[in-house]
Image (cartoon, coloured by chain):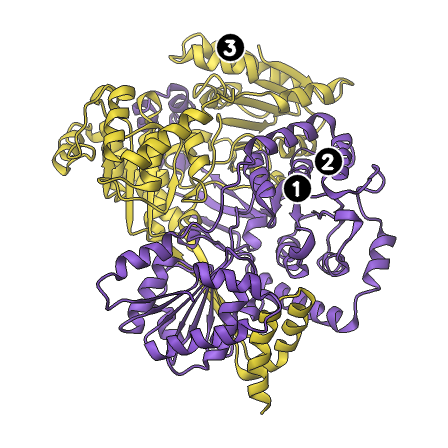
Chain colours: A yellow, B purple
Amino acid sequence: MPVFLDTARPDFDAAFATVMGAKREEAADVDAAVRAIIADVRTRGDAALIELTTRFDRLELTPDTIAFSEAEIDAAIARVPADQRAALDLAAERIRAYHARQMPQDARWTDDTGASLGWRFSPVGSAGLYVPGGTASYPSSVLMNAIPARVAGVARLVICAPTPDGVVNPLVLLAARLSGVDTIYRLGGAQAVAAMAYGTETVAPVDKITGPGNAYVAEAKRQVFGRVGIDMIAGPSEIVVIADADNDPDWIALDLLSQAEHDTAAQSILITDNAAFGRAVADAVAARLETLARRDIAGASWRDYGAIIVTRDLAEAAALSNRLAPEHLELCTADPEGLLAQITHAGAVFLGAYTPEAIGDYVGGPNHVLPTARSARFSSGLSVADFLKRTTIARMTPDSLRAIGPAAETLAHAESLEAHGLSVRARLDRLDR
Amino acid sequence: MPVFLDTARPDFDAAFATVMGAKREEAADVDAAVRAIIADVRTRGDAALIELTTRFDRLELTPDTIAFSEAEIDAAIARVPADQRAALDLAAERIRAYHARQMPQDARWTDDTGASLGWRFSPVGSAGLYVPGGTASYPSSVLMNAIPARVAGVARLVICAPTPDGVVNPLVLLAARLSGVDTIYRLGGAQAVAAMAYGTETVAPVDKITGPGNAYVAEAKRQVFGRVGIDMIAGPSEIVVIADADNDPDWIALDLLSQAEHDTAAQSILITDNAAFGRAVADAVAARLETLARRDIAGASWRDYGAIIVTRDLAEAAALSNRLAPEHLELCTADPEGLLAQITHAGAVFLGAYTPEAIGDYVGGPNHVLPTARSARFSSGLSVADFLKRTTIARMTPDSLRAIGPAAETLAHAESLEAHGLSVRARLDRLDR
């Protein structure tokens, strides 16, 4: 059973702090190991990649087989069942349509001094997506990372995906094909991140690296940050569901279990203004856990990190959710739009009883790469903006320089930056002649 | 003398690679020292801040004097000369006007299945700005960091600025006041970053930390990244000037020296299609260096990292600039707008002979916190967006769930995530009844 909290009880604050502070991730001490792997790839290039892949993935590569050939991709894709292909097509189309609306506008205007100001967006030159291997090898994540990059106009898009013992998920290759990925490398771990950041004889370096991964991949991204751009360091998944009594407890239970089945470190929290409904959901979760295929994982997550919080009203529920700043937030109430207006921090919000979070994982349209571990306080899910950068533009006329140049000169002087001031003064002197 | 390159010469590629690869920053090994300081602040709070400030800044603080009082700020501001106050006012007003245009739009629409989709922006809850002490204590940087935060709607905005021996720059306090900063702490170094990230008895934690700093500050920001948001890890400043022969060599020389005078590790590069003009600029730099107050710093930067590159034409100049992805780029040519269309990577662009880069440092309007060390390939200057985050929104209707739910179910099954599929199926079954 998960913890059962009630805001009306005097011990609530302490109990809620425990839920909020639950340390769900062990900070594996992989710092030095990752540093060594990156140094090795920088020094020895392909030779290091080949050796590390033999060691970690039990796969013998050559420079010619580091990347999948088109024929290999074709052959794998041919094995994908028709219904899965159709579902992936629908997902790709909806994700593309949503993200196409995110393209920001360039701007250019003339101010009252006559100066022309503005900015312009342009895509990063190249991007590399990390796709985990094994059970966490999700084709949906390929779409969610690759499509925004393509919408942004990134010219070169590659994937690194480990293939332990040579095994690859054909759906991952199909998702890559559907999203317009140029090259797929059979590389995983910190060595894949190092190859994308620094390049080797076979792998051309990229400008930005995104995508989830284990502790080694996360640490490698942190270490190459600055040399290349990265998206975020993702932690275990989490969901908050705010639901009133007018819901089917089984639906809400399944939504909570959708997060819990990802990972024993996932966290699912129900906040409700009705204690009886909270107990009904707890019972429904217990019933579903008896038959769920991933019941060991989901059960451990629910037992260790799950919570049901009973509040006096829905406003209090919104306030608690804001303190949690959840990755996913479902609003299953009579007036979800009204409640949404009270939400300040959340990665993605799902409104109403017919929007289970799983819709957002696949076919809703919004991105499923979202800020975890309360980082929705300050960061956003993946978007087209992650694959664009802004160049600011300024163009003075003689009149505008006359108008604002003297103030720049004064401030340069105040900051003891003489050449800054002189670069303005030399021009003003010419204009005054 | 800086290096003089010519794209027509056979050794150009190697010489250009040297200019591009010049390692201008020593990676000081401050990792462990910073880790210890952060741990100390987390454990001992104010006591650690007070002790570390005594050690590093030779200043005895108490919990009551960690923050400046309003009376102290008033007294300091009263000492600012009127012309400096007026210049700072003008700068603040122009920076505010530029950044107000950056506010992104929320969006909400209904797709062809009847689903309602969109996103909403909201400000980060609180932000902390680091302001270096000593000679790099720039009031202009206070404006450039604080104003975008205020435009974004950040509710609580604080500054940490070290005050070695108790000395503070009154202009920094005035800039903070003008930009609406709530609290200014007499704190510097890694301990200031730790206090803003984790909080102490006196310093409430913030959600996002921005601003430049030395190697300790940069490493501390890297270490707290994830716990809070950070802007970027800034390196030494740099400029590329693309200029044709129709410019005053002295103006261009002063623009190059404006970067060089910041730091011996700064880099100034002229790219021109006219060798004689390149030589004239070199002579003008040498002449200005004889009298410049910061000639030791600017001279060392120009000697060690400066370069003059002669190209066959301006298109080649644009291509080289794109490889450098400079923080600042001046286009001093007959048709700067035409050349701008060829620029793919640059932090900020300044067009025409009357737009010295120094205008952008102070009063132009665009932000002067910009990506360095070729990171303009994948990142942008500071903006209002750095103080906002996006929450995505999805709301299905029964019809839209009928239309796209089955595809979600198929993909959940393909990814072996049973509860995901069941959460959709349970709703579809109800609708089918």
Mark 2, secondary structure of its residue = helix
Residue that mark 3 sits on: A286
Q: Residues within 10 Å of mark 2 (few under 14, many from 20)?
A: many
Chain ID at mark 3: A
Q: Is residue B6 left or right of residue B238?
A: left
User: Which residue is at the front of the view, A378 or B288?
Assistant: B288
Label 1 and label 2: CA atoms lie apart by: 9 Å
Q: What amino acid is at disc 3?
A: Ala
Label 1 and label 3: CA atoms lie apart by: 51 Å
Considering only order in the chain, which callout, 2 or 1, is on the residue closer to the N terminus? 2
Q: Mark 1 touching mark 2, by CB under 8 A? A: yes
Same chain check for tags 3 and 2: no
Q: What amino acid is at disc 1?
A: Gly
Whether residue A130 appears in this view of the structure is no
> Residue B51, labelled with which disc?
none
In this rendering, the count of numbered labels is: 3
Single out the residue that lies furthest toward the bottom: A433
Q: What amino acid is at disc 2?
A: Leu
